[in-house]
Image (cartoon, rainbow, N blue to C red):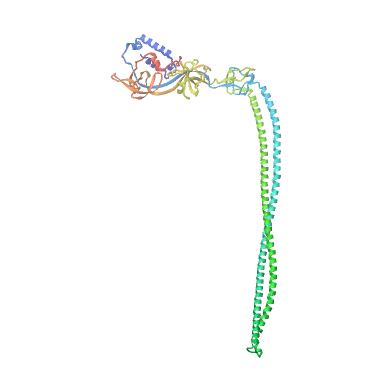
Amino acid sequence: MKVKDIVKIPKFWGKNKNIDFKKLNKKVVAAIIAAAVVVSAIAGVSGYKYVNAKSANEETETTIQVDNQSIEKTLAATGTIISAQESGQFATTTNSYPVEEVYVKVGDVVKAGDPLYKLDMSTMEEQLSYQQQALNIQNQQNAISESNATKALQDAKDTGAAQINEANRNLDQAKQDQNTANRNKSASNNALDAAKNTENDAKTALDNATAALSNAQAKVSSLNTTITNLQNQINSANASASTESTDGTEESTTDSATVDTTDLQNQLDQAKKDLASALEAVTTAQADVNAKREAYKSATAAREEAEKGVQSANDSVANANRSVDTAQANTNTTSNSANSNIVSQSQSLKSAQLSSQSSTLSAKEEISKSQDELSKATVYASMDGTVTNVNIVAGQTYSGTDAVVIDDVSSMKATADIDEAQIPNIAVGQKVQIKTDATGDTVLDGTVVFVSPTATKNSTKSTDGSSTTASVSKTRATYRVDVQIDSPNDALRLGMTAKMTFVIANKDNALAVPTADIQTDVDGSKYVVVQNKDKSTKNVKIETGISDEFYTEVTGGDLKSGDTIVENTSDGSADAVLDSMGADGGIYFE
């Protein structure tokens, strides 16, 4: 009978909770094997032959039928029972103070809010008194500073308002002067227009008088010419008559020989009368021209004076405009300066207020810190539980973090450090089987509730790279894993050793073969030897899944349930069986 047959018969690594073969180490398995060998020898069966199979070179093939079964891959580790909730109670004060009184001792059951111990904080009380006095003085100083800043702001507003009003009055006066200058300019322009019109009229009158004088003079000249012509005619006629009488060619004996110049004389007399009238007309026209010339000169002088008035008015308007611009600029400058001064004083007031608030807040913050520090004089329990450690005594100055330790003993956990090679197989929510010496063969169910993301500090745990457990030879990193115990037991106590089996994979109704019977071909593929009905054999390639200590899941290939496989007899020793189990020092005694 092979070792696998021995361990297969009771099937106690399955649902039998009283005997769990996975939890056995090499010594236990070796003991079972030895016992089986002895029984076989006494009964005279094939056990003796199996033990000596290698030396005898037996050719008898042992077979086993392939069937479906549950496979469960586990990881065993040794841990410690701890409280599901533990709290180190300590004063969260900034400084260290002497312990005034301790109210609890180890074993006391406390409720959240119960006093645990009290600190002597008389020095902090004295400091708080000084801080409150300093705040009172600071408030008085702040009030004075704010009052001065408020007065300075009001003064700036009053002064600025007066300056702005004065500047506005000056601007209004400048605008009034500007309006007056504009009115004067308009009047000057009107006077100039009137003077120009008068000048034009005088010029026209002078021109007319000059024309009349010219006409009168022309008439005198014309009359003088006429008179001269008439006189000449008369003289010529008289001269002609006298000449004929003197020559004697014919002696005139009657009056008919005399030339009649009466008509010419009449024309001459009339022309002389007309000349006298024309000369009077010339004298009158000349006097009128002289008068019109004087009038024109006066009109021209008046127009030139009006032009000077317009120029003066324009200058006055320009000066008034400049005065308005200057007054407006002064008003703007005054307003800006006043507003700037007001803003500056307002900011000074705000700065004084903020400074007061800041200094007050700083003082109040220090007072608040001192009051908060004093409020921590008495340390109260933060949870219900049992006092498991008291690290202080009255009179001692203590600043540690575990002055009083409280554990919730009604709910417990198991914790273990898992090797770095195996920690990837552990996840929150995994099921765990837990046993302790105190609870005997009772298996406690648990669930992983915490897997540390960082290595355990100062870890000395180690493991062989091929091991499925959490400890052996070389120093390696380990990671803390906490398991909530789902089925509490009154026999559990804090600090007990916990033997923990993590279920890292399982498969129900899986096609499985003994792990020892799986062989590897030269190309690296896996196979088992299948016996045909005619006792001949063939190699059947398979693909494998998860494995427990004895069996491996078949996930692919041509193998099927009911096939008969030939067991591998290349190494039938107990160590070979144990090696196939992946067992090492992490498997422990029950």
Query: Is 81 or 578 nearer to us in this picture?
Result: 578
Q: From this viewpoint, which residue is outermost toward the left?
A: 534
Q: Is residue 586 left or right of residue 219?
A: left
Q: Is residue 314 left or right of residue 490?
A: right
Q: Position of residue 120 (x, y in %)?
A: 65, 21
Query: Is 344 or 500 nearer to us in this picture?
Result: 344
Residue drawn at (66%, 23%) of the image: 124
Image quadrant of residue 205?
Answer: bottom right
Q: Is residue 521 left or right of residue 86?
A: left
Q: From this viewpoint, which residue is outermost toward the bottom?
A: 253
Image quadrant of residue 216?
Answer: bottom right
Q: Position of residue 335 (x, y in %)?
A: 67, 45
Q: Is residue 194 visible?
A: no
Q: Is residue 432 visible?
A: yes
Q: Position of residue 263 (x, y in %)?
A: 65, 83
Q: Position of residue 166 (x, y in %)?
A: 71, 47
- Number of marks present in the image shown: 0
449 over 175 or under it: above or below: above
The quarter of the rendered structure image containing the N terminus is top left
Query: Is 493 or 349 nearer to us in this picture?
Result: 349
